[in-house]
Image (spheres, grey):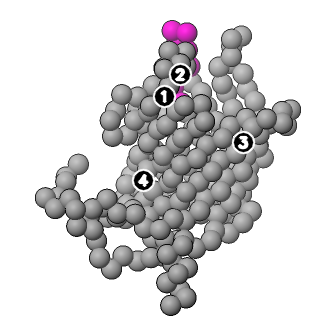
Amino acid sequence: MDVPEDIFTEPEDVDPETLANLGPLRRLAGTWEGMRGVDINPKAEGPETRDYYERIEMVPIDPQANGPQLLYGLRYHVNINTREEDITFHDQVGYWLWEPATGLIMQSVAIPRGQVALASGHAAADATRLVLKAKRGETDYGICSTGFLEAAFRTDSYRIEVAFHDDGSWSYVSDTTLFVRGAPFQHRDVNRLTRVAEPVRNPLAEIESKK
């Protein structure tokens, strides 16, 4: 990556409207539900397939600057349940971020079992397909886990592919390569989501609109 000599000066005249500057991520903004998710995960007796339903909230955040780097994004929360259990099957929070100047897309992932990841990819502003990846051991777009997960369910890589559809819905395939009891295991999640609520404006845009 090319790093400018001046790493401190932030851009001026930044557009406060996040929804207008999200590139391909604009199609993710809002609240979504998917009722036909499929999860393949490792168990002692072998791979287990579970059906699930999920709700995802994608909330626009104010523009973010790393010195000259300018990012627009969505803060998200994923909650997944199954029909046969009351307890949450999967919970996840993080950010989807877009850098208009380069086409860089990032997804940060944090789950309450002691694991975080930062995945990245590139796409055009009008892209209908996104692919992001993270790899264990990398210091820029990598994966970090607890000692127990490293020893028992090591995560070597993460890949998510998002497809936007003509009817306004979107789907994803998430592949996580695990190392369980000395053998690789491909953990996969698949679902298609429909918007159930439109996005709100980011706080700065709302403030600016009232001036």
Q: Point out which mark residue 149 bears.
A: 2
Dot 1 and dot 2 residues touching (CB under 8 Å) = yes
Give me the C-alpha separation between circle 4 and circle 1. 22 Å
Residue 153 higher or lower than 118, as above or below? above
Magenta stretch, main secondary structure class: strand
Q: Which residues are magenta?
A: 176-185
Mark on residue 99?
none
Locate residue 75 relative to residue 53 in the image: left or right.
left
Whether 94 is drawn above or below 15: the answer is above
Nearest to N terminus: mark 3 or mark 4? 3
Q: Picture coordinates of residue 19 (x, y %)?
A: 52, 71
Residue position for label 4: 105
Please give the label number shown on residue 145. Answer: 1
Task: Give the distance between the C-alpha atoms of the residues marked 3 and 1, in whole angstroms.
Answer: 21 Å
Residue bearing the label numbered 3 = 80
Residue 76 % position (x, y): 59, 54
Does residue 178 show up magenta in the picture?
Answer: yes
Q: Is residue 167 above or below residue 96?
A: below
* Mark 1 and mark 2: Cα distance apart in space: 6 Å
Q: Amino acid at mark 3?
A: Ile
Q: CA distance from mark 3 to mark 2?
A: 21 Å
